[in-house]
Image (tube, rainbow, N blue to C red):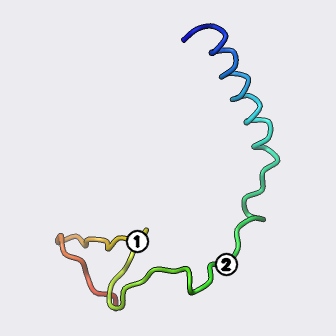
Amino acid sequence: MNPMKRLLTLLVYLTSLLHAQDLDLGARVKPLPAANRFGEKGYFVWCGAPVKGPDGTIPPRA
């Protein structure tokens, strides 16, 4: 990587660190409407994909 590109990368990184201190993600988190949720009746769904149990099967939701 040439020296100018390294310097620019460093400046962008340091600038992002300064602004990250002011970022309050907790204030930006809002409740998720039910219409925007993905679920499959009888199954646990994690990140849009079924989760396998310890025995390798997809357990039904209680």
For the N terminus, which image quadrant? top right
Task: Decide which of 9, 53 is in the foreground and name it.
Answer: 9
Q: Residues within 10 Å of mark 2 (few under 14, many from 20)?
A: few
Query: Badge 1 is on which residue?
Result: 48
Count of number-bearing discs: 2
Question: With 15 as the anchor, is 33 left or right in this view?
Answer: left
Q: Quadrant of residue 13?
A: top right
For the C terminus, which image quadrant? bottom left
State the residue at coordinates (78%, 51%). Answer: 23
Badge 2 or badge 1: first in the primary sequence:
2
Instruction: Determine the secondary structure under disc 1.
Output: loop
The relative height of residue 31 versus residue 17 in the rendered view (above or below) is below
Question: With 33 as the anchor, is 39 left or right in this view?
Answer: left
State the residue at coordinates (73%, 23%). Answer: 11
In the picture as drawn, the residue positioned furthest to the top comes out as 3
- Residue 54 image offset from top left, x and y in percent: 22, 70
The relative height of residue 1 versus residue 59 in the rendered view (above or below) is above
Please name the amino acid that badge 1 sits on: Gly
Query: Badge 2 is on which residue?
Result: 31
Cα separation, mark 2 vs mark 1, equals: 18 Å
Please name the amino acid that badge 2 sits on: Pro
The relative height of residue 32 versus residue 25 in the rendered view (above or below) is below
State the residue at coordinates (73%, 36%). Answer: 16
Task: Decide which of 62, 32 is in the foreground and name it.
Answer: 32
Q: Residues within 10 Å of mark 1 (few under 14, many from 20)?
A: few
- Residue 58 image offset from top left, x and y in percent: 24, 77
Q: Are discs 2 and 1 less than 8 Å apart at CB?
A: no
Question: With 46 as the anchor, is 54 left or right in this view?
Answer: left
Task: Decide which of 38, 54 is in the foreground and name it.
Answer: 38
Q: Quadrant of residue 47?
A: bottom left
- Residue 3 image offset from top left, x and y in percent: 63, 7
The relative height of residue 25 versus residue 48 in the rendered view (above or below) is above
